[in-house]
Image (cartoon, helix red, strand yellow):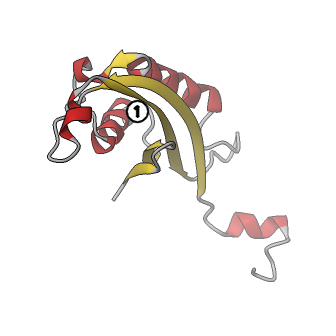
Amino acid sequence: MHAFSHNPAFLHLTKMVVELSQRFYFEAAHTLRRKVDTDSSLRIHGHTYHAEVMLRGEPDPVSGMLVDLALLRAALASVRDALDHRFLDEVDGLGPATLENLCQFIWRALAPQLPQLARVTVERQVSGDKCALCAA
């Protein structure tokens, strides 16, 4: 830690980047064509998915916020509504319901409203499967 880091004036001399995240979950069913475990994957089955969206950037100097959490939560509610208690095979623009495609779907839905978007993570905690899509 820098010797001046306890001095509030020091914070004004350095570029501050914050990471702000919000989590949500959704329940959904799907089928999946794959090369292994084909029988169980082809049957309609469901999962509880946990998603986390992370924003990165400089906070507004007046409000001190990267983004108002109410705006972030509203954007996430819209995406959650598109996925929660849905048959994912029928969700327009998703494609096969893989973790990778779910990350991309969420990213595409949020990026126009949240230019600070830096990472989208989707996981199935019960099975330990997780995917993260990060800004380059």
What residue do we see at 63% from left, 33% from top?
68
What residue do we see at 23% from left, 23% from top?
89
Q: Which percent across, then down, holds residue 73?
A: 58, 27
Q: In the rendered image of this protein, does residue 106 appear above or below residue 43?
A: below
Tell me if 63 is positioned left or right of 71 in this view: right
- Residue at the far bottom in the pictured view: 3
Tell me if 120 is positioned left or right of 54 in this view: left
Q: In the rendered image of this protein, does residue 102 appear above or below residue 6?
A: above
- Residue at the far right in the pictured view: 7
**In the depicted view, which residue is nearer to us: 90 or 115?**
90
**In the depicted view, which residue is nearer to us: 114 or 33?**
33
What residue do we see at 57% from left, 37% from top?
23
Q: Quadrant of residue 84?
A: top left
Residue topped by disc 1: 110
Say which quadrant the C terminus sits in.
bottom left
Q: Which percent across, then down, holds residue 60?
A: 63, 45
**In the depicted view, which residue is nearer to us: 48 or 80?**
48
Say which quadrant the N terminus sits in.
bottom right
